[in-house]
Image (cartoon, coloured by chain):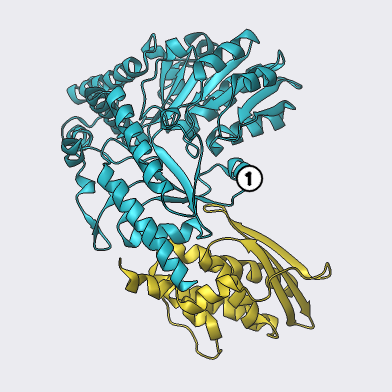
Amino acid sequence: MSTNNLDQLYRSVIMDHYKKPRNKGSLDENSVTIDMNNPTCGDRIHLTLKLNDGIVEDAKFDGEGCSISMSSASMMTEVIKGRKLEEALELADIFSKMMLGEEYTDKYDLGDVEALQGVSKFPARIKCATLAWKAMEKGVQNESK
Amino acid sequence: MNEIRKQFPILDQEVNGHPLVYLDSAATSQKPKQVLDVIRKYYDLDNSNVHRGVHTLGNRATDSYEGAREKIRKFINATSTEEIIYTRGTTTSINTVASGYGRQNVQEGDEIVISYMEHHSNLIPWQQLAKEKGAVLKYFDLEEDGTITLDTVRATITDKTKIVAITMTSNVLGTINPIKEIAQIAHEHGAIIVVDAAQAAPHMRIDVQDLDVDFLGFSGHKMCGPTGIGVLYGKKAHLLNMEPIEFGGEMIDFVDLYDSTWKELPWKFEGGTPNIAGAIGLGAAVDYLTEIGLDKIAEHEHQLVEYAMNEMEKIEGLTIYGPRDPMKRCGLVTFNLDDVHPHDLATVLDMNGIAIRAGHHCAQPLMKWLKVSATARASFYMYNSKEDIDALVKGLRQAKEYFNDVY
């Protein structure tokens, strides 16, 4: 089997986030709640964000989906925590560029998120990876208005 | 069936460095050369609009277009071509019944009965109709193996039931439903039966008179024909009483400033320039299927399903959904493997050139009933072989190994 290609997609750090998701769960009712699904495949995310003074103080997610969608959600919550709202939005934009295989700024340390770069070579799976980021973008944008 | 495979040019290619193994025919079938040639020939030699040209090309196009309708009539044994309406596909066929028949005949408090195994195309139109009319939408309960018993059918249909809408074969469970018996029970209560035959028409013989169904829809692209063309069969008595759904060219008789009259059946339901090449291509697909023989196709698929179920069950941690008896199902196997998500499974198989479907298969209520968020599905057609299933099983074993390693 062409495991070399597969290893580009299923990097060990991705499988680690899938098996041991960070920030899994739900924040209390004072948080911003976003439910989103991917109607073509059934992936589902329930994201809660604690936004205070223009900062993402905390983020938790719940849901069901494939390894790519769930690990991406886990990584996303890690990278946006403590960020300013506009930084979180910029990160969502960077992630979307990464998925499209476009150039993006290196001003942020993306940490584990870098491991998702390989997804851009699997067009059918890009929507899995972007679900959590779209949910976060929606939640933060509503708050910034 | 080796000769048959060669008639499908698309199957002769490598995908990701492996010979293509196409196991997604329930989503859409591949097209044989015979069908592709007919479509090509139509555009090369006969392309013209139908039902209006006095010229020779117009006559040829009309003859082929209407000739295909006669082939389809014969294919499902309808009494007349007046009962064969061209549509875009099963979705449009069912929507036409829901809007054209349903709006005229369903009142507040009436019941519409469907099942948990419906594809969204035979679910949402009825949901919408029920909401609009204040009607009650009811579901046939499923047995544990994903079948519907006649006891359930008798207990669910009442004298308030106006429409029973059900799939002939499930696109997820593979279940073949007892349409003839359900039709009889529906009729005893004064209800009509609408049948989604999208997954059945490609794979088994259908006789609308013997089944005694009121409406039946299917899609060309799942039965070796092109996309964008399908059929609505309806009993003439119903069609005569129904108003057209779309208004405009092609479907009119006399047009006055403030009023118009409609063409005869079936054309009053075919507004606008139709999908002429699609209809002719579907006619060629019907010829193709008829020549091989629907019974032979069904037998081949039963053998494949039996073989696939036996081989797949040997893989530890693999769950197959739907009836256990291969004779009670159409040519597909829906499954999950351990806790590997179906998308991850499909990607690994794709890297091996194997195309399967992963997701909710446009049947979200059924996924809820199965208590899963998604499943994987391998579906077969006359061009598939035991070797294809061997490749699938090998791929599944490798996927299992791969994910065990990376987990």
Q: Can residue B150 be seen in this view?
A: yes
Of helix, strand and loop, which one carries label 1?
helix
- Give how far across and how far down residue B81 sits, in percent: 37, 13
Residue B73, x across and y down, in percent: 35, 16
> Which quadrant holds residue B197?
top left
Q: In the picture, which quadrant includes the N terminus of chain B?
A: top left
Q: Colour of chain B?
A: cyan
- The residue that appears at 25% across and 47% down in the rendered structure is B387
Q: In the image shown, does B248 or A118 lie closer to the viewer?
A: A118
Please give the residue where the numbered disc 1 appears in the rendered image.
B368
Left/right placement of residue B57 relative to residue A16 reads left
| Viewer-side residue, B324 vs B360 | B324
Q: How crowded is mark 1: few (under 14 residues within 10 Å), some or many (20 or more)?
A: few
Disc 1 chain ID: B
In this rendered view, identify the residue nearer to me: A85 or A27: A27
Viewer-side residue, A132 vs A71: A71
Image coords of residue B46 (percent x, y): 19, 29
Count of labels in the image: 1
Residue shown at 59% from the left, 77% from the top: A75
Residue at x 60% of width, y 19% of height: B150
Q: Which chain is yellow?
A: A
Q: Where is residue B101 in the image (x, y as percent from the top left)?
A: 58, 19
| Residue displayed at 25% across by 30% down | B48
Corner quadrant of residue B225: top left
* Residue type marked 1: Lys
Q: Is residue B379 left or right of residue B384?
A: right
Asked if residue B52 shows in the view, the reply is no
Note whether B176 is above or below A56 in the view shown: above
